[in-house]
Image: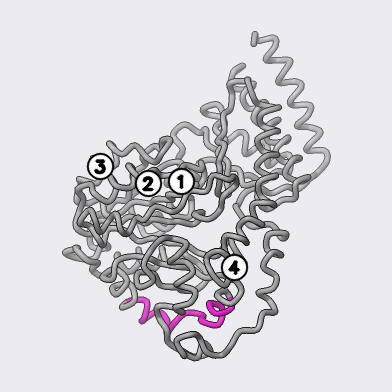
Amino acid sequence: MSRDELSDLLEEQQSLHAELKARGGKLDITRGKPSPRQLDLSRELLSITVPVHAADGQDVRNYGGAKGLPEIRAIFADLLGVDVDHILAADNSSLSIMHDLLSYAMLHRIHGATEPWGRQEIKFIAPVPGYDRHFAICEHLGIEMVPVEMGEHGPDMDEVEALAADPSVKGMWVVPMYANPDGVIYDEETARRLVSMPAAPDFRIWWDNAYALHHLTDAQPRPLPILQMAQQAGHPDRVFEFASTSKITFAGDGVAFLASSTGNLDWYLSHAGIRSIGPDKVNQLRHATYLKDAEGVRALMRRHRELLAPKFAIVEKILGNRLGGTGVARWTHPSGGYFVTLDVLDGTASRVVALAKEAGIALTPAGASHPLHRDPHDRTIRLAPSFPSEGELAAAMDGVATCVLVAAAEKLLG
């Protein structure tokens, strides 16, 4: 566009933005929360009757059972493709397990370490864009993060391998299936390089399979057998794998899972046993009774897809209609997960978020997808379509498109 055309566009979009502000709306697409309709899919959990004793005879009302109930572990061992002896079930949050594991490693010597990580200057590899809550754990514990750009099938592995050769690099965050926020699926080659590459003896991969079952299309890849891959590569202790029912049943009242080598699980339980005298086994049995088996989980996830897929289609349609062909934005087209990544004109993401706030649209803060909230390009915005109704989402996305165009025109005229 010429400067005159850009000025006309800016005036037009500023007028639309003023209308949004005048309406005084309140729309929130900040976090990937299940909608009330999704939560209602598992409403039966609120009234289901469960027996007093689990299949192995233990009284679920009492203390103990640190590894969790065999029946719920068996369901998710099947879903994740791991041996049931290599998975444990905990309370509702896999993020809690991640935090605890990292805290234990900081305070106590993990396998292969000469001393606790807290006595060393250590680093974590952080693929970007990535999950803000992963990065927050490292930030909270004072761990330096080294960003690596994501590609089509995972992060730049040449760079990852070069970084991992540094003995001070002790870990790496990975969301292997429908990565948060750009929907990337790690391929087998990337996974095998991760478990095979030279690294410190106490190097660990935090393999967060939060979205392994959250498909939006008929193409539904199975989770990679990462624990077996690590075993075959001669590094059986390299991977901590996580999953939960947080976006399957109730987000705040589910069951979380940790899968790893026997040595890693024994090490974790030796410290978790100080923190707690066993998980919530009543809730675990409730979930096992309700879900029944792996196919029961898959059937429930198909019902989630019926609610989620139309929302992602709304995002795609509005962004395409409003921003397609402009050259000032590009976005991901995920086949699963909970997010869409919107990349706007460099240097304008913060402005877009601010304009959206003025218009009553809450977006995830610019930079949230990068360590310490520092996006060097100020371009990436995470969109979370799941929680609002379809009408609210359409209004929010139309408003976001207006804000993108205002910010872009301002910059280009700058």
Q: Against 267, is 380 above or below?
A: above
Residue bearing mark 2: 126
Q: Against 45, is 95 above or below?
A: above
Front residue of 61/293: it is: 293
Count of all numbered marks drawn on residues in the image: 4
Residue 280 on the magenta span: yes
Residue shown at the point (39%, 68%) measured from the top left: 100
Report x, y in % for residue 32: 60, 52
Quadrant in the rendering for residue 276: bottom left
Q: Are marks 1 and 2 in contact (CB under 8 Å)?
A: yes
In primary-sequence order, the first of circles 2 and 4 is 2
Quadrant in the rendering for residue 291: bottom right
In primary-sequence order, the first of circles 2 and 3 is 2
Q: Which numbered marker is on residue 161? A: 3
Report x, y in % for residue 48: 67, 79
Under mark 4, the amino acid is Gly
Residue bearing mark 1: 130
Q: What element carries label 2?
A: strand
Report x, y in % for residue 344: 56, 30
Under mark 2, the amino acid is Ala
Residue furthest to the front in view is: 295
Quadrant in the rendering for residue 39: bottom right
Q: Do the residues labelled 2 and 3 touch (CB within 8 Å)?
A: no
Residue shown at the point (72%, 18%) measured from the top left: 9
Residue bearing mark 4: 252
Label 1: few (<14), some or many (≥20) within 10 Å? many
- Left or right, residue 180 beside residue 290: left
